[in-house]
Image: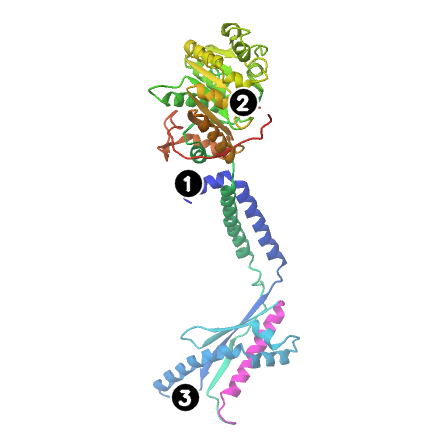
Amino acid sequence: MNLHDLVRLLRSRWVTVLSTTVVVFFAALVVTLTTAPLYQASTRLFVSTTGSASASATDRFQGNRLSQERVLSYTELLKGQTVAQRTIDKLGLDITADELRSRVQASAKADTVLISVSVLDGSPVRARDIANALSDEFVVMVSELETPAPGVRPDARVVVEQRASIPSNPVVPKKFRNLALGIVLGLTLGIALAAVRDLLENTVKDRETLESLTGVGLVGTIPLDKERRNQPAIAFDRENSAISEAFRKLRTNLQFLAVDNPPRVIVILSSTPGEGKSTTAINIALALAESGKSVVLVDGDMRRPSMDKYLDLVGAVGFSTVLSGVASLDEVLQESKFPNLKVLTAGPTPPNPSELLGSQAAMKLLEDLRSQFDYVIVDTAPLLAVTDGAILATVADGALIMTRYGVTKREQLTHAVGTLESVGAALLGAVLTMVPVRGSGAYSYNYSYSYYGQRTAEAPESFEEGENSKSSRVEGHQSKR
Ligand SMILES: Nc1ncnc2c1ncn2[C@@H]1O[C@H](COP(=O)(O)OP(=O)(O)OP(=O)(O)O)[C@@H](O)[C@H]1O
Ligand SMILES: [Mg+2]
């Protein structure tokens, strides 16, 4: 995972990271608050060997070295059973010698004759008393051990150089360390969880996945825009919003597809219902019309037509009426409210839409439209529900497949692409729809582009979605048909 991946992960899964951090932090807080405090009291002992006043410098040096060697043994004795038991006896403590030993620490600094002794206890006063009593008992014990024979001066002696005082603050729990550790652990765990969730993610959310599953390049990233639910058509003459810019970029990218033979009859597909086919078809048509091209929008979704509703047009006659020979194309082609855009609504739902759409009449109708308009944009029914979309795609110049961000499942997309391949339809590009603008940071993908599958720097205007990279797989909604 490089820095870019980490930033993307943090932006797209910040809720997971934050909530894990908060949970672990609170766990650390609870542990800290419920841990019984322990106080530490310390003494310092000084070890000396007994030398006569007339001893030479060499003797004193040797005496000093002997003291240092003894110090190491003393630190062990201080943690031993005997001195612990004597301390217990002296203070009348209600604990075992082993328990006391586990609370005693003794250490000596290298090249010194000083020993630090510390004792842990739940009571600060008792900690002090034990430390002092233990040190005193040790002094007595040393004088016994180091006296070669009764009445002879001991070889070494220990004095309590610094007595213990009552500790004011407990040493356990270590509040600051625990809480800091809670944050660090929480963050680490949160990032790990986020990465696992990312791995388990089975919807399409990024360019790489989309391109790899469809085997074509991302040509458009359409942001989620709640206004589209009330008014599917964008007023391109007035609007300069993110979504209108996204469609203008999509329009530009369409012109770069197959430059020698640019597609003019384009079918808008998706795997499952509700991925934004109709809304996107309308706005691609409007974006093309805005650039001065004559465009016809065809509602090829005869099972659940929407162009009449979305564009306030007559739905009683249309595509199916012409195919059945009841009316001519000119009679049913409707003017829209927008310049350069005419619409062929779906017409009444026939009993056999797939058959009708696969007929010679349908092919001829699309050819007629091609000859009359610069662009023919055909909306369709979802691919995984019915074959209508795939049939229309085979007679068109190519198809664009819509994929709804975070909803379309990878398997669904893979399945839909497989259906298209099996009928030999040309897929021109993929469009990621309803991409959240804030929070996930997904829409920022719009501003970088890949060149032969490689992500590079910031995209120049309108080329940010582009080149193809190969691969395969995806998914979407439940079919309602
Ligand atoms: N970019 C967008 N931002 C917000 N909402 C959108 C966007 N595009 C489409 N929608 C909404 O999503 C819903 C489905 O859109 P639409 O009807 O275009 O999808 P569809 O793929 O044509 O569906 P169906 O398969 O049922 O025909 C609609 O309520 C629409 O308003
Ligand atoms: Mg639709």
Q: Earlier in the sequence, mark 1 or mark 3?
A: 1
Predominant secondary structure, magenta span? helix
First to last magenta residue range: 122-150
Distance from Cα at disc 2 to Cα at disc 3: 110 Å
**Total number of numbered discs in the rendering:** 3
Q: Nearer the viewer, residue 391 or 12?
A: 391
Q: Which residue is mark 1?
A: 4
Mark 2: secondary structure: loop
Asked if residue 126 shows in the view, the reply is yes
Q: Earlier in the sequence, mark 2 or mark 3?
A: 3
Kindly report which numbered mark, 1 or 3, lies closer to the viewer in this rendering: 1
Per the image, label 3 sits on a secondary structure element best described as: loop
Ligand 2's quadrant = top right
Q: Which residue is the site of mark 3?
A: 53
Circles 1 and 3, Cβ within 8 Å, touching? The answer is no
Question: Which residue lies at the image location 55% right of the left edge and 56% below the top edge?
Answer: 178
Asked if the stretch drawn in magenta spans residue 133, the answer is yes
